[in-house]
Image: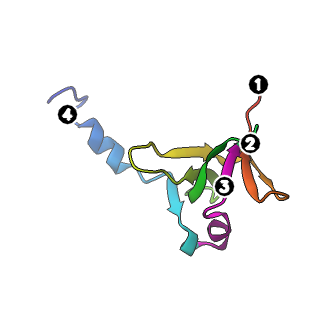
Amino acid sequence: MQGTAGGRNRSNQRRARPARFTRILADESSTAGMLYGCPVVSAVGDRIGTVHHLMVDVLTHQLRYVVLAHGKNSATVAIPWQALYFDAALGRLVFYTLC
């Protein structure tokens, strides 16, 4: 028993719980289809990436994260939906933070 409590392995405990979020791809939802490939920029207009898929809360069925497409050797980036707004004039999502 290597570093386990009560004889259970921590990784097994994590797997036992149901997933909290589910991925929604462009071909699975009209909303995801509309947002797929949409540019995401910072509040000052610097390009961050493009929308790859959405993450929805399984319990509440609410959109929680926008996951950006990433190139080789780069990390996956998930931005909370509440931190984005849609700039309809320029057809892009803007990631804003309060400073």
Q: Are marks 2 and 4 in contact (CB under 8 Å)?
A: no
- What separation in Å lies between label 4 and label 3 (alpha carbons)? 48 Å
State which tag comes first along the sequence, 4 or 3. Answer: 4
Give the amino acid at mark 3: Pro
Q: Residue furthest front?
A: 46
Percent coordinates x, y for residue 3 in the rendering: 21, 26
- What separation in Å lies between label 2 and label 1 (alpha carbons)? 16 Å
Q: Are marks 1 and 3 in contact (CB under 8 Å)?
A: no
Q: Which residue is mark 4?
A: 7
- Say which mark, if any, is on residue 99: 1
State which tag comes first along the sequence, 2 or 4. Answer: 4
Identify which residue, 36 or 23, lies in the foreground: 36
State which tag comes first along the sequence, 2 or 3. Answer: 3
- Which element is circle 2 on? loop
Which colour scheme appears in the figure? Answer: rainbow
- What separation in Å lies between label 4 and label 1 (alpha carbons)? 46 Å
Q: Which residue is mark 2?
A: 45
State which tag comes first along the sequence, 2 or 1. Answer: 2
